[in-house]
Image (spheres, coloured by chain):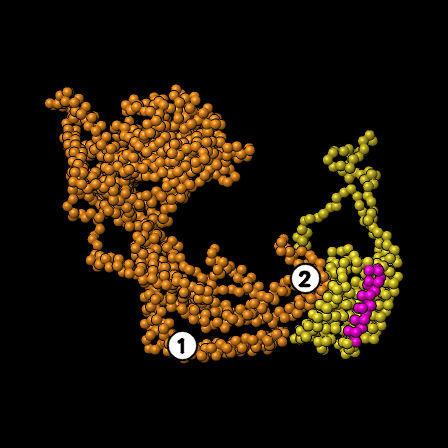
Amino acid sequence: MRDKRFVMDYTVETSQLKQKLLKTIYSLQLKSFTTLQSASPLLHSQCGMGMVSQHQVHQLADKAKSLCGDLDNIKNLLHYCQDDLVRQIPNPTGSCYGGVSGIHCSLDGSIYVTAESAPWVHVLSSTGHTLQALPCQQMGKGGSIFLPEDVTVTRMGMVAVADMVNEAIWIFNPHARLSKKEWIKIRKVGSPRGIGVDSMGKILVADYAQGQVHSLALDHACRTLSVQSVPNLQGPRYVSPVPRGGFVVSEECGDVKVFVSSHKLPSSLSSKYGHQFGNPAGVCVDRDGSILVADEQRRTVHLFPEHGAPICLVSTGLQRPAGMACSSSGHLFVADTLENCVKVFKYCVRPPYRPTNIGASLGIHPSRVTAMVLKVFFPSCCSSAESGILIGRWISEQNSAVILAVVHFPFIPVQVKQYLGEVQRVTKVNVSVLGSWSNSKQEKEESLSEFLEDLGTIFCHEPWIQISKEGDSKFWSCSTLQKHSKNPQEEEEEIILVYYDQRKVMLSHLHPPLDTSGHGAEDSSKLWAIFDTVARSQVLFMTDRYDEGPIKLTHWQSDGVEASIIVELLKQASVPACMLLTLLLSLLSGLCTSRVLNFWPLSFLWSKLSTCEQLGHRLQHLQVVSSNKKAQNQSQLMRKANIFVSLLIDVALGILLMSWLYRKNRIGHLADTLIPVADHVAEELQDLLQWLMGAPAGLKMNRALDQVLGRFFLYHIHLWISYIHLLSPFIEMILWYVGLSACLGLTVALCLLSDIIALLTFHIYCFYVYGARLYCLKIYGLSSLWRLFRGKKWNVLRQRVDSCSYDLDQLFIGTLLFTILLFLLPTTALYYLVFTLLRLLVVIVQGLIHLLVDLIDSLPLYSLILRLCRSYRLAAGVKFRVLEQQDGKPLRLLMQINPLSYAGVVQTYRLPTYSCYPRDSWASLCKKLFLGELIYPWKHKGDKQN
Amino acid sequence: MEPVPGRRWKKVLYERQPFPDNYVDQRFLEELRKNVHARQYRYRAVVFQSGAVVQQLCSVCVFALTWWYMDAGMLSPQGLFGAALVSSLLGYVLFDAVDGGAGRWASGRTRWADLKSTLVFTAFTYGFSPVLKTLTESISTDTIYAMSALMLLGHLIFFDYGANAAIVSSTLSLNMALFASVCLASRLPRSLHAFVMVTFAMQIFALWPMLQKKLKARTPRCYVGVTVLFALAALAGLATVSSVGAVLFASLLLAVSCLCPYCLIRLQLLKDNIHGPWDEAEIKEDLSRFLM
């Protein structure tokens, strides 16, 4: 199906042909330019025509006209392709209704489809998946349905459909609140068929029976403000807006008519292009202004470019085309009624690159733009450059020009344009020639200024900026030229010159990163556009000043990269190293996730050991660092760098620790002290229990229960001591091996320490759990029995306390138990209190260790170092310093970068941690402690999901 | 302004009337009514109703006496258990005999359920009696006495004497009595004592009022006789312990049964409750700021 011309074709004939075509066009351009350069001063002067005769001029004009037509045709034929079917999207309503008829492609690329006699509007993605189905049903009044004929989307994102049966236009706001989601009938129209929205936001409706096209202006509440009608059409069917105002309408078995914005002066396509239509159906206009028409009878789609002959885009493969839409990405969506599907064709060879004025395409009138202040961002390194032309980017929304470099004389304009095209292709920045720059040490030369103005006619740019610096004067003169406006001197445009340090702006990153969804960040997005422009044109700055190229440029120059050989070697070496690391890591993670290690008791154990968590965390970090994928944006790159530096520092600290530990037999000393410490703790606990078994602090405890509990806990301590003594011969060896883990990083060693503490204080944890469970049981029993005591009960259904009449035996047993529990409570509570305090002590120690680990894990060290040494790299904004100000001269400002604050750096680049401590508030913690619920240093399973 | 003869005064504020501001005529208070809901009591009826209070006072007195005897070792637990058992059986028979089984038939409670309840009481009390024995070992006896006294007082306050008031809660009253009995029982020398004490408390505080209520409703004469007998028995018992206490208790009983009804009837005459077609004034403002 693919057109042969656009498949990669490297045969000799093709390349020769290509070369020939390019050469022809170049020679034409060069010839005409050199002629212009030599002829324009002569023609501007007062002398006559020389030897040129009238006949020659006319002949040249005719030839040029035909040549222009030929060039246009060649351009079009190169640009478009034929019969390139990309995909077929079946009718989303299925085959039980009629075939697809209406289609619309919105700016975000989603497709809106209606089918004949189906009460639905389907919203599809560009690949044909149904995103949304809007039932065409009126809410409320009996829910009557209607059948949409054609569909369009307004600028506010509302879906408008034409309903021929009810003779009405319906509108639906999918962004409204749920309660307001309904179709609103906005107007009765005789027999609406095609519908569209023009560049002014008006809804265009083709009225088939009356032969009119109405354009309805709506306000925010969907009320009709005004109606304009264009009469005298022969059965209008489909209507489509033209981006620059006006619309195109197809007549049944007739012609396609084009109306300009005044809604008068129709021009017919068949007479303009000499094309004979069969039965024109769907029409649409693409961004270039080319009109596309589907012919129902001839089963073709033709494209009518602004300049050049019509081109047949689809010659075969269509059965009965109806509605048609084209997207900005160069795709054509044709609704085929007979085959009941939407056929997607690619008609542009590549999506059209549009260096046009965005303000114009948005419908903003150019005269309104000129009223704004013109800002020229000028690189401070170019202020001493020789005269030349300014290249940079024109940001029309902000009415500002970002100058990137100065091209010196002499140059050949073709080469400059070629060079700029290349730069555009590489950087994807819309770089163009913005104006001229003259730096004359001497007095002003008349010829130079004239020549500079002439340059403006060669490099079409609007406005044409002329900056000149005279001698050592501080004040520069700056002016703009509006060639197309009729009275350029009507209003004096205010110009602000803003100097910026090209290197710093290029390297810096504006914070916070632009989020495309936010509407409030308009100011930051303006600044962001400037920063982005400079950063993306980095390639432009890479050309060395000493390179012998066709063009001489002045811009920021790096002073060469130091130690580049070592850096290059490292770069080369890092790729295989990363690959090896990735392989090892995938092996390791595969081993970790294998089923052998994940059955129940082990997986539970892993989740409780903080060392395992930390190792897993570091494993993820390593995977991130060693992944071959290029970081997509700045924040990801910073994240990688931060992780890498954090890893490095962690490991360095760990090795430092290890070197300290393994010197002078410190491990042995540690082991020798550890066992007595554990023994000592156990003994202290024993003493504590003995004290509790007496009458601690003069408290009245129940002696029997006290004795039972005390003996129970004493037995545990006895067990613990014997366990420690069993372990004591091996402890040094264990410590020696455990100390090796410090080479994996300080955090791992710290986590291990925390785990060891947890293991060594396991008896305290056990006591705490026993005490808490007992206490919890008592508290719950007492609270419910207290309600029974008062003759109340807890109503579970209503979540409140109700009165209740109990039986006599219930009352008796309840009160008996209540009395017993009440008198036993102080004993249990004391045990609980003491063990909870011990437990909290251990938890606090562990928490401090984890805090340290988290600090090392999450601190964005690389960003902090960057902020410390290269503060301009992380920009929070800019400040402007006024350099000179004088009436009649442009204001000169120096743009300086405001660095991000340290708190901001930490906040922005903080690495996420696997925080394993509970996020309870203090109040809830106290409540839990009071009620005897267990508190854990780690998160609960349920919390993790939140 | 002088009153105009042709025009009558109206008790409204929203009209301008030809009278001084402080003027009212004879009809001003003609809608006033006094003591609409006041009840006329008869002395005998009030004395009869006060029997419930006397009974409950005597019950508490008997319970305390029993505990005293047990604690002093003058009453063996077996003897008390036997006596209590016999009186309980008697009361059980009487309970059904008084109304000829009508009450039982109405409540639908079977004898099997009664037996089960009895077994549950006995088994639990017996099982827990060693625990009860050691429960309050470390707590001082005075604390126990104070707690029991408070609980028994609470029992008397919250007891359902037949009045329709918010404070009445027979459940709470019974629970407080049981709590007091458990506290006191824990002071007795052996666990059998404790068991018998708690059982006795159950009988005297839970079962005995039920029988009384039935007697009062069915045979008022008999009820008066039982009350007098019970009061005399309590007094006699108290006299063996402390004659001063007996005198004081007797005077208390007399005051409750004779003096208090007399006072009530005398005071009823002074009742001056006014009603009329007006809304009572309510002072909602916080007056505490005037106190400062």
Q: Which chain is orange?
A: A
Residue depicted at x 83% and y 41%: B30
Q: Which chain is yellow?
A: B
A778 vs A901, nearest the viewer = A778
Q: Quadrant of residue B43?
A: bottom right
Chain holding disc 2: A
Q: Quadrant of residue A29?
A: top left
x, y percent for residue B250: 84, 68
Residue A302 appears in the picture as rendered: yes
Q: Would residue A364 appear left or right of A784 to someone viewing this image?
A: left
Could you tell me which quadrant the N terminus of chain A lies in?
top left
Give the residues in magenta: B79-101
- Mark 1 and mark 2 lie on one chain; the one further toward the N terminus is 1
A731 vs B104, nearest the viewer = B104
x, y percent for residue A447: 16, 33
What's the amino acid at mark 1?
Answer: Ile
Residue A373 appears in the picture as rendered: no
Residue placed under numbered mark 1 in the picture: A731
Label 1 SS: helix
B126 vs A570, nearest the viewer = B126
Is residue B97 one of those drawn in magenta? yes
Residue depicted at x 32% and y 33%: A317
Q: Would residue B55 appear left or right of A933 to someone viewing this image?
A: right
Position of residue A611 relative to residue A555, above or below, is below
x, y percent for residue A12: 16, 40
Residue placed under numbered mark 2 in the picture: A788
What's the amino acid at mark 2?
Answer: Leu
The prevailing secondary structure element of the residues shown in magenta is: helix
Label 2 SS: helix
Position of residue A567 relative to residue A146, above or below, is below
The answer to whether marks 1 and 2 mark residues whose Cβ atoms lie closer than 8 Å is no
